[in-house]
Image (tube, helix red, strand yellow):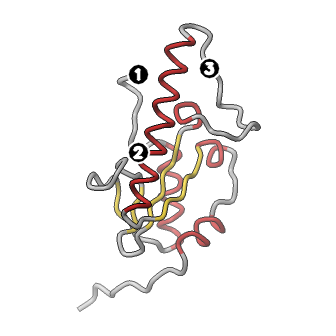
Amino acid sequence: MAKVGGKDTMPELVVRRMLHAMGYRFRLHRRDLPGTPDIVFVGRRKVIEIRGCWWHRHPDPACPNVATPKTRPEFWAAKFAANMERDRRNESALAARGWDLLVIWECEVRRGYDLAPRLRAFLGKVRAGRSRRA
């Protein structure tokens, strides 16, 4: 499990490329926020987390990625329950600090859902950037 990467995963990179192409600018993995969110929009006080369906137990019954291993089911049940509880704590802590959270699930990215309208609705209009030309 130590080799499972938590940053720069394929679904995260896809969403980041999409956001950048849409004109949004963001920060990554802010450690001063609860849960170290994947994508942070500081000026908007909004964060996006891209969650793996298997590790975080995607609640959608149609998700094909949520399966429990047959070996050591008690261990895995406790592990998954702890992950989900940590997610709830982080969501509450972010909300208490005044941050809005959007969760995007791995299967939504892999299945090719059109995430652009959902991202635009969450983030609002793209702000005009400052020109770097002198």
Q: Specify which label sits upstream in the sequence, 3 or 1.
A: 1
Q: Residues within 10 Å of mark 2 (few under 14, many from 20)?
A: few
Say if 82 sits above or below 18 in the image: above
Query: Residue tagged by mark 3?
Result: 68
Query: Residue tagged by mark 2?
Result: 8
Q: Identify which residue is drawn at 49% across, 59% down.
A: 101
Query: Residue tagged by mark 1?
Result: 1
In the image, 122 versus 107, the foreground residue is 122
> Spatial distance from mark 3 to mark 2, Cα to Cα?
25 Å
Q: Quadrant of the N terminus?
A: top left
Callout 3 secondary element: loop
* Disc 1 residue type (three-letter): Met
Say if 111 sits above or below 56 in the image: below
Q: Identify which residue is drawn at 62% across, 48% down.
A: 109
Left or right: 1, with 14 as reference point: left
Callout 1 secondary element: loop
Q: Specify which label sits upstream in the sequence, 3 or 2.
A: 2
Q: Quadrant of the C terminus?
A: bottom left
